[in-house]
């Protein structure tokens, strides 16, 4: 179960159980009678994997719309803004967990924040996943120290299985990121409003700027500065797309001292202005 943490901007769901207690892991079934359909775009403070068991759905993740049918698996990272609209016969479930629950190396092999954050399982694969989900559901409903350990072990096995499917169905050589790059991206998510430079991030990661540059080029084909600027602009797009804030208000929300500087920054990354992005829905 989730609750919404009120914000002035995009609502954020935080991870709690059915008793309203903060938890690190949760399992939730959604169907025709529990009002899962989203009324507003939102984001999380946790990772979510959605399993579509029957029926069809439309799922917006950031700026892309994905169609879901039986056997689809969708991956939503904490920074993503998403909204799910299901048809009346659609059933499914979600696994939700905090970042610290599983090793970064494992998370880096799953398509969170990937250009295609989805998998389509075969019937055989879905049958195996369904059995694993049933065991997780049964154990998580009867909380104990033993069941909690079992749930983590079973979930980790499921994540490994899904990462193998992802690896076998993608030709993107950058689909698996080094853990240090995942940590760097998380640092950007936490500090992008501070407008830190590459040296500042390297210090936080306890590596040299040159090493950070080399790692980013090797694993993403981009420089650290490009990744910083792309994330900042992606956050600007989320605000422009999902809120009624003006371009000027978005600039100040992202701690730009001058809206003109923000527009110049945005255009240098995208090739078009934030006003054009909002007007034309790029």
Image: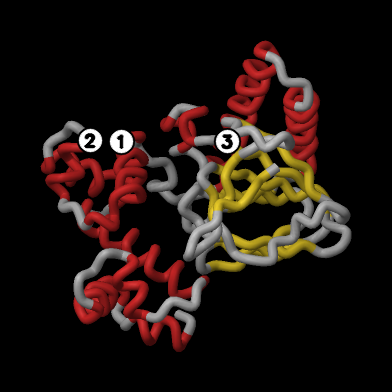
Badge 1 element: helix
Picture coordinates of residue 75, whole percent (x, y): 58, 48
Q: Is residue 271 left or right of residue 4?
A: left
Residue at screen point 20% across, 76% down:
258
Numbered tag placed on residue 97 in the rendering: 3
Q: Do the residues under discs 1 and 3 have CB atoms within 8 angstroms?
A: no
Image location (x, y in percent) of residue 242:
52, 71
Q: Nearer the viewer, mark 2 or mark 1?
A: 2
Disc marking residue 180: 1
Q: Total label count? A: 3
Residue 54 rendering spot, x and y as whole percentages: 83, 52
Please rate how many residues cluster around mark 1, counting C-alpha atoms within 10 Å: few if below 14, some from 14 to 19, many from 20: some
- Mark before the other along the chain sequence, 2 or 3: 3
**29 in relation to 87, above or below:** above
Residue 239 drawn at (x, y percent) = 44, 69
Q: Are marks 2 and 1 in contact (CB under 8 Å)?
A: yes
Q: Label 3: state its secondary structure.
A: strand
User: How many angstroms separate mark 2 from mark 1 (CA)?
Assistant: 8 Å
Front residue of 168 and 266:
266
Dividing the picture into quadrants, the one containing residue 39 is bottom right
Q: CA distance from mark 1 to mark 3?
A: 20 Å
Helix, strand, or loop for circle 2?
helix
Q: Looking at the image, tell me whether mark 2 or mark 1 is earlier in sequence order.
A: 1
**Rendered image coloring scheme:** secondary structure
Check disc 3: other Cα within 10 Å, few if <14, some if 14-19, many if 20+.
many
């Amino acid at each position: 179960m989730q609750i919404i943490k009120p914000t002035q901007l995009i609502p954020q769901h935080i991870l709690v159980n059915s008793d309203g207690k903060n938890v690190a892991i949760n399992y939730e079934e959604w169907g025709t009678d529990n009002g899962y359909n989203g009324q507003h775009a939102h984001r999380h403070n946790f990772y979510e994997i959605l399993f579509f068991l029957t029926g069809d759905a439309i799922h917006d993740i950031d700026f892309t719309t994905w169609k879901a049918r039986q056997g689809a698996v969708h991956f939503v990272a904490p920074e993503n803004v998403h909204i799910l609209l299901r048809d009346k016969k659609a059933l499914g479930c979600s696994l939700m967990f905090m970042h610290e629950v599983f090793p970064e190396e494992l998370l880096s092999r799953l398509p969170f924040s990937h250009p295609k954050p989805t998998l389509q399982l075969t019937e055989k694969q879905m049958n195996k996943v369904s059995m694993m989900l049933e065991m997780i559901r049964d154990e998580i409903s009867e909380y104990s120290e033993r069941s909690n350990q079992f749930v983590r072990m079973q979930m980790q096995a499921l994540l490994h299985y899904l990462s193998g499917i992802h690896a076998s169905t993608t030709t993107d050589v950058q689909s698996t990121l080094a853990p240090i790059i995942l940590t760097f991206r998380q640092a950007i998510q936490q500090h992008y409003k501070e407008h830190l430079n590459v040296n500042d991030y390297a210090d936080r990661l306890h590596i040299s700027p040159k090493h950070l540059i080399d790692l980013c080029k090797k694993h993403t084909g981009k420089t650290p500065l490009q990744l910083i600027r792309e994330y900042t602009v992606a956050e600007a797009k989320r605000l422009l797309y999902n809120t009624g804030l003006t371009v000027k208000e978005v600039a100040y929300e992202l701690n730009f001292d001058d809206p003109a500087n923000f527009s110049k920054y945005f255009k240098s990354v995208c090739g078009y202005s934030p006003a054009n992005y909002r007007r034309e829905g790029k």
